[in-house]
Image (cartoon, grey):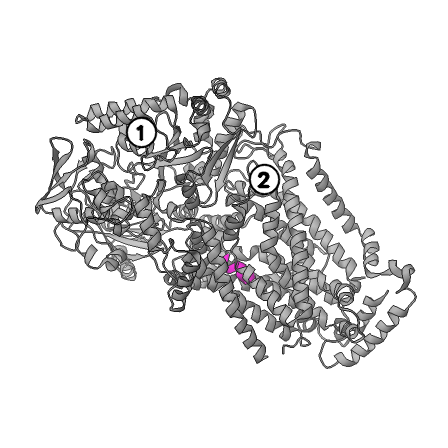
C-alpha cells in the first residue's frame, strides 16, 4: 500500500507532545514514497489512492447492490412508461383516497389519481432534485469549507462569515423571494435554490474536517517537505476529510427531496401540474389517520432511494479509507 | 486564545449589518404588504396610502433601512401590523424556543451519540441495521406526520402528555416536541458518529490503548469518542440555527408560539420589522454557536490551536 | 388566572365534601366551575389588526367585538334577521334621512352611559382618514364622507356632516343616496358605540377594550390568550349563560382540534379539513355544520381584452358547467360546502333574496354541453386556464386542483387548467387589486350584513371596491340603483334578483359553493351554535 497506509502507521496515541518526532518518522516514509518505483512515472499511476479505491469498490457487494438500485431509478426516471401504463395526472374524484384495488395496486390519492403511476412518474423529478441538489451542495460546500479550513486566517474569516449570513436566511423567506419571480417550469430553479441555501452546512462540516485533517502528522510532514497546496489538499487531506461530508450529503439527499415539497407547499416550488414524491408525501400527510396508504408508497420510494445512496456513500468512504482495509 | 475570541466577536459587526440589510431588502422585494391587510377586498386607496406612510413604506428603501437601524440602536425593533411591539414578541418567543432547542440538542447528544457509538462499534450487526432502518423512516416520513402521530398516541389515546403546550411551557412539556424536532438531526448525528467511530476504531492509538490493557469503556470514551466528535460537534453547531428558526412544523403541531412560528407569520404577512428583528437575533446566535464550536475543536483535538 | 384557579379548587373541595361531583377533567386551561359560572375555553386566532371596531375586518377580531359590544342592530344568531338592540327605532320617510332613537338604560361596562354621542363620535372616528380604520368605507353612504375621507389629499373636515346629535338618546343621519335597507347594515361591528376612554387613553383601551356587550375583558395577552368574563350588570336581554370565555390562540387549527378531542378545550370553531372524515367518530353529535354567509367564486379579468368578449362569455359559462360541484363538495370538503346555484347565500333565506337554482343549467355539471360551449367560444383564452390562489392560508390547493381536474376531464386535456399558487395572501391580493392577473383567480366573499345587496353591489357594480375583475354592465348597475331606492323591502329584494339574473347571462364570476361554518365541542358544554357569520354564539353556551 502506498502512502496513506504509511501515514496510518505513523499515527499513535494523540498528543501534541509526540507530534514532532512522529512527524519525523512520517517524513521519512513519505520521502521514500515519491521515489519508490510504484509512486511515480506513468506506469505507477494506477496504483494511486483513487484507482485503489475504484478497484476496491468493484468487488464490494454493497456497492454493486446500491449501484444497481440507482441504475434502476435512473432508468425509471428516463422511461417511466416502462413499468407504468397510466397517466399520473388522470383524476377521477370519485376514487379519492380509495385503497388498493385490481389495476391500482397502491390505491388512489385525494384527487383520485393512481398512486402507483404517480410514484413511478415522480421518480424523475425527485431523483433529479435530490441528486443534483446534493451534488451541488456537496461540491460548493466542500470547496468553500475546504478552502476556509485549509488556509485559515482571513480566508477562513471571510468565507465563514459569509456562511453565517447565508445561514441567517430563512428557507421560507428565501423561497418566496427567489423562487416567486421564476417562471421556468423545470426543476432547475428549485435545485439552484436548495444549493444556494444548503451549501453553508456542508461548508461547516468540511471546514471542521479539514482543520482536523490538517493537523495530522503526515500532512505537517508533507508541508515541511514542500508539497504544493493542491497536492496536499487532493492527496492528503481530501481522503481523510471526506467521510463526514459523504455522510451528511447522503442523508441530506432525502431531506432535499422533501424540501422540494415544502417549497411546493409554499406555492413557489415546481409549477403545476408537477408530479413528485415530495408533493405526494406532503399531500398525504394530512390524511394520515384515514388513508395511510397514500403516504406509505411515495415515502417508501424515498426511503429506498436514500438507502441506496447511504450504502453507496458507505462503500465509497470505506474504499477511500485505508484504515478499514 | 483571548485575542482570537475578541477578533471573532468583532467580526460579528459586519455580519450584523450585512444580514440586516440583506433580509430587509428581501422582505422589501416581496412587495406591498398593505393589500393583505384588508381581507378579500380592496383597501380603499386613501387608507392604504395613509397606512403606507404610517409604516414608512412610502419612503425609498435605503431611507427605510436607515430609519430602522437608527431605531434598533435605541432598542426599538418596530411594531408588527397588529400593533404589538417586536421586542415584546421576541421576549415571549425566544425563551420558549431556547428551551425547545436545548431539549432537542440534549436528545441529539444523548441519543444520537450513544446510537452512533453502538452502531459504529458493531458495524453490520443487527443493531446497526435496525438503526439504519429507523434512520430511513425518520428521513422519509415528514416531521409533520411523526409529530402528529406522537401527539395523537401520547396526547389523545394514552393521555400521557397534553397535546398542546401551555403559553409559557416548562422543559418537561417540551420533551415530546423536542424529540420530534430533533428527529431528523438525530439521523445525521447517529450516522456521523457511527462513521467517525468506525474510522477511528482501527486507528493505532486505539489499538495501542487496547494493547496497554486499558478497560474498554475508557478506551471508547476517552480515546475513541473524543477524537470522533469533531464532525458531530460541527454538525450540532450548524443545527442550532435550523432548530431555532426552522421549527415551524413542530411549533405549529404543539401550539408553541416560538421563534419559528413568529418568523413564519412575519414573512407571510411581509412585515419587515418582525422578520429583520428575529433574523438578526438568530444570526447573532449562529455566530456565537460557531465560535463555541471552533473553541471546542481545540478542546477535542489539542493539536488545534488558535492564535 | 391563578386566582380563578384557586377559587375553582376551593369550589371543588366544597363540592366534593357535599357530594361526589366530578371536578376532574377541568384540567384544561379554561376549565372553570360548572353551571352558570362555568368558563368555556375556545380556540382563537391572533387578530390581524388592533382591536378597534372600525379596524377589524376578519373573523378572529370580530369574535371578540361580538362578545364585548352591542350596536344599534343585532342579527338574530339563528335567522340572521336584523333586530333592534340598542336602537329603540330607526325611522325614515324618504329612505335617505334616518332618525335613530336609542333605548334608555344602556351603559358601558365602566359605568359610562351609552348616548347618541357615543355613536356619533365613534362613527366619526371610524370614518376619518387620519385614523387609518380599514372599515372606513362602511360610512361611505353618510353625507360628508368624501370630506373626512377623500380619495386623495388630506381631509377637509373632521366630522361627517350627515350626522347630527339631537338629544342624549336621538341622532339623525343623512345619506348621500337613497338606501332603504341601510338600517339593516348597522349590525356590523364598525357601527358600535365607543366610550370616552377609547379617545382619552387609546393605548390603555387597546390593551383591554371596554364595551357595552355581555362580556368584559378580564385579561388580554396579545398573541396568546384573552379571558372574557360575564358582565353581571349587562343591561341587554341576551345575558351570558356561562361564567365567561377563555380564548386561546392556536398556531394551527389541527392542534386546537386535537386539544378538543383530548378534553383540554371546549370549543373549536373551525374543524380542519383533514379531520372531517373522522369527525363523527371523534365527536359524535358534538359536531355542527351550518351554513354561513360566505360564497366562493372564480373571478375573471375583464380588464384583459381576451376575457371581455362575447366568445369569452360562452367560455365562462362552459367552464361553470364543467365543474362538478357536488362531487368536489362531497369528496374534498366532506359536505362542509354546498354547491352554489346563485351568487348569494342560503343564510339570507328566501325572503332575504336567496334563490336556489337561480343560476340554472349554467351552474350544473354537464360534460357535453360544457365542452360544446367552450369550443364554440374559441377555447379558453390564452389556451390554458390558470386559477391563482394564495398558498399560505386556507388550503386552497386541494379544491383548485379538483376544479382543474374536473375541467381537464371535460376538455380531455390534462393541462387545460392548472393551479397558480401565490406565496402570500398579501402578494395575492396585491396582484388581484393591481390587475396583474391575466387568467382566473379564486375569490371568497364573507358578508358584512345579511342583505342581498351586500352580495351583489360591492362585487359586481361598476368600479365597486371589490369588483376586482373590473366587470361593468349598465343594465346591472341600473337595477341595483333601482333596488336601493325601493322603499318596499320585498320589491327591493326582487329587483336585486333581477340584477342577479344578468350574472347568469354574463357569468362575471363562476359561483362555486356556499361555505358552511363547522365547529366541534366537548361534552362539558351545551347549546353550541354558529351564527350566520360562522362565529359561535358564545353567550348562549351553557356549561354542564
Numbered circles on residues, count? 2
> Disc 2 versus disc 1: distance between alpha carbons?
41 Å
Q: Is residue B254 left or right of residue C342?
A: right
Task: Identify the residue at horizontal 56%, vertical 75% (top origin).
Answer: B7
**In front: label 2 or label 1:** 2
A21 or B144, nearer to the observer: A21
Q: Secondary structure at mark 1?
A: helix
Specify the segment rendered in magenta.
B239-245
Q: Is residue C484 left or right of residue A216?
A: left
Task: Identify the residue at horizontal 61%, vertical 65% (top origin).
Answer: A159
Q: Is residue C444 left or right of residue C391?
A: left
Q: Is residue C381 above or below residue C265?
A: above
Q: Which residue is mark 1?
A: C346
The quadrant in which the N terminus of chain C is found is: bottom left
Q: Which mark is residue A185?
A: 2
Question: Mark 1 belongs to which subunit?
Answer: C
Q: Position of residue B45 (x, y in %)?
A: 32, 44
Amino acid at each position: 500500500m502506498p502512502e496513506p497506509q504509511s501515514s496510518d502507521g505513523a499515527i499513535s496515541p494523540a498528543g501534541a507532545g509526540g507530534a514532532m518526532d512522529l512527524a519525523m518518522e512520517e517524513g521519512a516514509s513519505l520521502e521514500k514514497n515519491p521515489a519508490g518505483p510504484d509512486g511515480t512515472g506513468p506506469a505507477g499511476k494506477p496504483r494511486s489512492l483513487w484507482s485503489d479505491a475504484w478497484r476496491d469498490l468493484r468487488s464490494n457487494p454493497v456497492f454493486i447492490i446500491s449501484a444497481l438500485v440507482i441504475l434502476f431509478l435512473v432508468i425509471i426516471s428516463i422511461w417511466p412508461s416502462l413499468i407504468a401504463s397510466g397517466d399520473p395526472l388522470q383524476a377521477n374524484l370519485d376514487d379519492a383516497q380509495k385503497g388498493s384495488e385490481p389495476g391500482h395496486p397502491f390505491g388512489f390519492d385525494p384527487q383520485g389519481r393512481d398512486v402507483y403511476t404517480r410514484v413511478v412518474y415522480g421518480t424523475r423529478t425527485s431523483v433529479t432534485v435530490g441528486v443534483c441538489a446534493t451534488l451541488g451542495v456537496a461540491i460548493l460546500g466542500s470547496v468553500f469549507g475546504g478552502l476556509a479550513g485549509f488556509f485559515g486566517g482571513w480566508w477562513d474569516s471571510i468565507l465563514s462569515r459569509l456562511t453565517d449570513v447565508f445561514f441567517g436566511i430563512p428557507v421560507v423567506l428565501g423561497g418566496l423571494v427567489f423562487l416567486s419571480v421564476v417562471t421556468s417550469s423545470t426543476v432547475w430553479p428549485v435545485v439552484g435554490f436548495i444549493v444556494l441555501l444548503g451549501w453553508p452546512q456542508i461548508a461547516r462540516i468540511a471546514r471542521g474536517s479539514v482543520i482536523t485533517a490538517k493537523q495530522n502528522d503526515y500532512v505537517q510532514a508533507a508541508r515541511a517537505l514542500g508539497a504544493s497546496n493542491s497536492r496536499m489538499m487532493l492527496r492528503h487531506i481530501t481522503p481523510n476529510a471526506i467521510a463526514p461530508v459523504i455522510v451528511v450529503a447522503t442523508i441530506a439527499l432525502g431531506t432535499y427531496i422533501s424540501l422540494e415539497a415544502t417549497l411546493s407547499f409554499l406555492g413557489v416550488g415546481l409549477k403545476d401540474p408537477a408530479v413528485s414524491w415530495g408533493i405526494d408525501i406532503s399531500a398525504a400527510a394530512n390524511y394520515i389517520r384515514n388513508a395511510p396508504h397514500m403516504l406509505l408508497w411515495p415515502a417508501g420510494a424515498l426511503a429506498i432511494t436514500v438507502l441506496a445512496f447511504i450504502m453507496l456513500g458507505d462503500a465509497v468512504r470505506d474504499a477511500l479509507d485505508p484504515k478499514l482495509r | 486564545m483571548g485575542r482570537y475570541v475578541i477578533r471573532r466577536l468583532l467580526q460579528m459587526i459586519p455580519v450584523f449589518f450585512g444580514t440586516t440589510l440583506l433580509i430587509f431588502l428581501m422582505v422589501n422585494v416581496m412587495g406591498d404588504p398593505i393589500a393583505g391587510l384588508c381581507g378579500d377586498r380592496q383597501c380603499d386607496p386613501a387608507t392604504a396610502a395613509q397606512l403606507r406612510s404610517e409604516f414608512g413604506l412610502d419612503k425609498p428603501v435605503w431611507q427605510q433601512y436607515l430609519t430602522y437601524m437608527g431605531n434598533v440602536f435605541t432598542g426599538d425593533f418596530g411594531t408588527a401590523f397588529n400593533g404589538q411591539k417586536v421586542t415584546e414578541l421576541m421576549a415571549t418567543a425566544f425563551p420558549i424556543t431556547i428551551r425547545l432547542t436545548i431539549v432537542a440538542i440534549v436528545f441529539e447528544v444523548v441519543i444520537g451519540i450513544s446510537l452512533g457509538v453502538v452502531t459504529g462499534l458493531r458495524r453490520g450487526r443487527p443493531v446497526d441495521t435496525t438503526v439504519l432502518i429507523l434512520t430511513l423512516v425518520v428521513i422519509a416520513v415528514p416531521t409533520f406526520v411523526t409529530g402528529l402521530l406522537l401527539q395523537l398516541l401520547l396526547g389523545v389515546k394514552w393521555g400521557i402528555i397534553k397535546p398542546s403546550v401551555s403559553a409559557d411551557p416548562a422543559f418537561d412539556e417540551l420533551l415530546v416536541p423536542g424529540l420530534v424536532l430533533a428527529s431528523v438531526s438525530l439521523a445525521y448525528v447517529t450516522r456521523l458518529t457511527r462513521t467517525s467511530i468506525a474510522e477511528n476504531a482501527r486507528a493505532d492509538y486505539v489499538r495501542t490503548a487496547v494493547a496497554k490493557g486499558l478497560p474498554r469503556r475508557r478506551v471508547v470514551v476517552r480515546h475513541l469518542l473524543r477524537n470522533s466528535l469533531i464532525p458531530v460537534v460541527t454538525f450540532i453547531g450548524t443545527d442550532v440555527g435550523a432548530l431555532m428558526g426552522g421549527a415551524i412544523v413542530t411549533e405549529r403541531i404543539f401550539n408553541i408560539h416560538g421563534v419559528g412560528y413568529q418568523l413564519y407569520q412575519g414573512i407571510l404577512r411581509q412585515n419587515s420589522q418582525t422578520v429583520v428583528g428575529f433574523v438578526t437575533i438568530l444570526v447573532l446566535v449562529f455566530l456565537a454557536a460557531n465560535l463555541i464550536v471552533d473553541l471546542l475543536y481545540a478542546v477535542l483535538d489539542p493539536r488545534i490551536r488558535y492564535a | 388566572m391563578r386566582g380563578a384557579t384557586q377559587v375553582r379548587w376551593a369550589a371543588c373541595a366544597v363540592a366534593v365534601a357535599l357530594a361526589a361531583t366530578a371536578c376532574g377533567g377541568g384540567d384544561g386551561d379554561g376549565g372553570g366551575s360548572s353551571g352558570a359560572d362555568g368558563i368555556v375555553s375556545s380556540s382563537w386566532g391572533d387578530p390581524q389588526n388592533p382591536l378597534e371596531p372600525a379596524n377589524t375586518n376578519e373573523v378572529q377580531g370580530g369574535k371578540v367585538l361580538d362578545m364585548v359590544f352591542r350596536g344599534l342592530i343585532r342579527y338574530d344568531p339563528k335567522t340572521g334577521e336584523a333586530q333592534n338592540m340598542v336602537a329603540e327605532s330607526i325611522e325614515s320617510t324618504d329612505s335617505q334621512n334616518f332618525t335613530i332613537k336609542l333605548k334608555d338604560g344602556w351603559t358601558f361596562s365602566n359605568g359610562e352611559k351609552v348616548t347618541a354621542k357615543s355613536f356619533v363620535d365613534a362613527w366619526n372616528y371610524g370614518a376619518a382618514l387620519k385614523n387609518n380604520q380599514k372599515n372606513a368605507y362602511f360610512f361611505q353612504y353618510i353625507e360628508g364622507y368624501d370630506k373626512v375621507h377623500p380619495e386623495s389629499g388630506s381631509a377637509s373636515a373632521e366630522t361627517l356632516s350627515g350626522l347630527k346629535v339631537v338629544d342624549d338618546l336621538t341622532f339623525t343621519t343623512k345619506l348621500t343616496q337613497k338606501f332603504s335597507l341601510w338600517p339593516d347594515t348597522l349590525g356590523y361591528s364598525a357601527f358600535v358605540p365607543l366610550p370616552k376612554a377609547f379617545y382619552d387613553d387609546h393605548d390603555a383601551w387597546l390593551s383591554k377594550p371596554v364595551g357595552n356587550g355581555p362580556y368584559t375583558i378580564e385579561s388580554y395577552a396579545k398573541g396568546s390568550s384573552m379571558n372574557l368574563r360575564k358582565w353581571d350588570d349587562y343591561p341587554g336581554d341576551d345575558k351570558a349563560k356561562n361564567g365567561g370565555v377563555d380564548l386561546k390562540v392556536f398556531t394551527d387549527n389541527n392542534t386546537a382540534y386535537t386539544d378538543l378531542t383530548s378534553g383540554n378545550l371546549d370549543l373549536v370553531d373551525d374543524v380542519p379539513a383533514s379531520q372531517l372524515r373522522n369527525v363523527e367518530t371523534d365527536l359524535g353529535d358534538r359536531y355542527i355544520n351550518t351554513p354561513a354567509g360566505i360564497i366562493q367564486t372564480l373571478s375573471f379579468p375583464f380588464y384583459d381584452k381576451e376575457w371581455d368578449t362575447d366568445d369569452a362569455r360562452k367560455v365562462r359559462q362552459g367552464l361553470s358547467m364543467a365543474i362538478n360541484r357536488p362531487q368536489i363538495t362531497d369528496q374534498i370538503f366532506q359536505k362542509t360546502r354546498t354547491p352554489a346555484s346563485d351568487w348569494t347565500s342560503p343564510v339570507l333565506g328566501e325572503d332575504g333574496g336567496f334563490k336556489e337554482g337561480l343560476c340554472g343549467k349554467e351552474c350544473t355539471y354537464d360534460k357535453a354541453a360544457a365542452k360544446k360551449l367552450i369550443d364554440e367560444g374559441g377555447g379558453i383564452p390564452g389556451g390554458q386556464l390558470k386559477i391563482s390562489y394564495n398558498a399560505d392560508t386556507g388550503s386552497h390547493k386541494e379544491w383548485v386542483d379538483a376544479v382543474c381536474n374536473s375541467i381537464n376531464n371535460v376538455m380531455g386535456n390534462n393541462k387545460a387548467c392548472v393551479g397558480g399558487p401565490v406565496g402570500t395572501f398579501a402578494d395575492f391580493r396585491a396582484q388581484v387589486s393591481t390587475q396583474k392577473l391575466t387568467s382566473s383567480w379564486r375569490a371568497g366573499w364573507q358578508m358584512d350584513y345579511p342583505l342581498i345587496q351586500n352580495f351583489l353591489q360591492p362585487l359586481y357594480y361598476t368600479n365597486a371596491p371589490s369588483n376586482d375583475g373590473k366587470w361593468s354592465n349598465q343594465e346591472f348597475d341600473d337595477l341595483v340603483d333601482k333596488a336601493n331606492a325601493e322603499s318596499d323591502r320585498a320589491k327591493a329584494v326582487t329587483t336585486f334578483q333581477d340584477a342577479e339574473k344578468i350574472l347568469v347571462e354574463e357569468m362575471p364570476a363562476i359561483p362555486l359553493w356556499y361555505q358552511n361554518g363547522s365547529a366541534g365541542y366537548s361534552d362539558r358544554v351545551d347549546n353550541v351554535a354558529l351564527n350566520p357569520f360562522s362565529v359561535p354564539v358564545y353567550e348562549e353556551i351553557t356549561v354542564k
